[in-house]
Image (cartoon, rainbow, N blue to C red):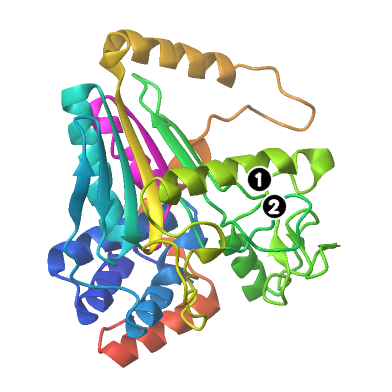
């Protein structure tokens, strides 16, 4: 089923206001959430809305947080999200990083006491309009086993980097440090499809194609899938995200990160506060003139686009290309939603008196 951006945006805003979010925060959170659907990251868009509501019901999301800086230097800060929606906390923190970069050349912000923040790319891309490079990281629920382990100790822990160009579109990398994000499994589950081998292991640590493998006690695998294909590198990347986001800020890390699903309770003996994020903003002209840099970024992008392709492939793509193209298409033609997601949203609307039609 296809829905317009405006319809989904107004519905999302309405639900968020019903759980107590001020209109300004509801508008921002809806913008972050819908940006995922526009860019084709369907696992992190409106399909997540009921999950946020369930966390609010459990008292794990504060709809009116007093977000504040609790420690800072001219170029760094730690932000306390006061248990707010990560969809609101993260843009606040990224703006702090941008403001610091304006003055110091670079800005670096680590966040504690937050929640799931949507797609990493949204926050990294905030830097682009300021001729800055943006970096966005977050830790997440422990669903990932380190290489050689059966235990779930890390999250999917995404990394996003956004780099401005001149005439070419920006370079925007936005990726989990696992072979696939958990949301991809959720989509396969809704479609009753198997997962490719290399995504999941069962509870005994054996490879499995069962898309419900994590629910059955298994784990997601680090980027690479197994040691022979480089999973130790994916494990290291996920660990770096965890440390920057949480050990640096005072958030929970590793197996202590609170689960996104409301039916699982957080660890009764936490090592920090909430979920953690990390943001960076770097002024291009802190390194070389911005126009000069962006001209060379155009040259870089154009050369990679002209790369000779392997058989069966038409072109080499630049990180951010598929999402940008899909965003343009979905703004024009609408956003497709799976039937279970539509049913979930309709039930949510009936419950809170917000029309979904």
> Which quarter of the picture shows residue 23?
bottom left
Coordinates of residue 347 in the picture (x, y in percent): 40, 88
Kindly identify the residue that appears in the image at 62 percent across and 63 percent down.
Answer: 143
The answer to whether one can see residue 325 in this image is: no
Seen from the viewer's position, the closer of residues 314 and 282 is 282
Q: Position of residue 258 (x, y in %)?
A: 47, 69
Q: Residue at x 72, y 41 (%)?
A: 232
Q: Position of residue 205 (x, y in %)?
A: 81, 63
> Are the residues at dot 1 and dot 2 in contact (C-beta closer than 8 Å)?
yes
Q: Nearer the viewer, residue 36 or 25?
A: 25
Q: Which residue is mark 2?
A: 146
Query: Marks 1/2: CA distance?
Result: 6 Å
Label 2 SS: loop
Q: Secondary structure at mark 1?
A: helix
Viewer can see residue 127 = yes
Q: Is residue 123 magenta?
A: yes
Residues shaded magenta: 115-137
In the drawing, does residue 250 fall left or right of residue 126?
Answer: right
Residue 133's quadrant in the figure?
top left
Q: Earlier in the sequence, mark 1 or mark 2?
A: 2
Q: Which residue is mark 1?
A: 235
Q: Residues within 10 Å of mark 2 (few under 14, many from 20)?
A: many
Q: Is residue 111 above or below residue 132?
A: below
Q: Residues within 10 Å of mark 1 (few under 14, many from 20)?
A: many
């Amino acid at each position: 089923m296809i829905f317009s951006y405006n319809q989904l945006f107004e519905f999302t805003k309405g639900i968020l206001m019903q759980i107590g979010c001020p209109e300004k925060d509801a508008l921002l959170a809806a913008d972050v959430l819908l940006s995922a659907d526009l860019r084709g990251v369907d696992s992190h868009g409106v399909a997540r809305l009921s999950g946020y509501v369930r966390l609010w019901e459990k008292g794990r999301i504060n709809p009116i947080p007093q977000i504040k800086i609790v420690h800072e230097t001219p170029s760094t800060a730690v932000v306390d999200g006061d248990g707010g929606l990560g969809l609101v906390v993260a843009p606040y923190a990224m703006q702090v990083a941008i403001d610091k970069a304006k003055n110091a050349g670079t800005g670096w912000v680590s966040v504690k006491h937050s929640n799931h923040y949507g797609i990493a790319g949204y926050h990294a891309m905030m830097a682009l309009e300021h001729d800055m490079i943006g970096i966005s990281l977050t830790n997440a629920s422990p669903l990932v086993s380190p290489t050689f382990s059966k235990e779930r100790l890390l999250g999917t822990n995404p990394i996003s980097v956004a780099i401005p160009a001149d005439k070419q579109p920006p370079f925007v990398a936005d990726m989990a440090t696992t072979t696939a994000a958990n949301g991809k499994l959720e989509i396969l589950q809704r479609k009753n499809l198997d997962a490719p081998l290399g995504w999941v292991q069962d509870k005994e640590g054996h490879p499995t194609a069962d898309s419900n493998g994590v629910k059955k006690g298994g784990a997601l695998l680090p980027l690479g899938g197994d040691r022979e294909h480089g999973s130790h590198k994916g494990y290291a990347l996920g660990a770096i995200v965890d440390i920057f986001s949480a050990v640096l800020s005072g958030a929970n890390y590793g197996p202590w990160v609170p689960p996104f699903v409301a039916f699982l309770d957080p660890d009764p003996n936490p090592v920090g506060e909430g979920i953690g994020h990390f943001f960076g903003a770097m002024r291009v002209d802190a390194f070389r003139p911005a126009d000069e840099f962006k001209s060379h970024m155009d040259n870089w992008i154009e050369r990679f686009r002209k790369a000779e392709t392997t058989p069966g492939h038409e072109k080499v793509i630049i990180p951010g290309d598929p999402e940008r193209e899909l965003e343009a298409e979905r703004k024009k033609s609408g956003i497709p939603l799976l039937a279970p997601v539509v049913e979930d949203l309709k039930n949510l609307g009936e419950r809170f008196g917000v029309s979904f039609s």
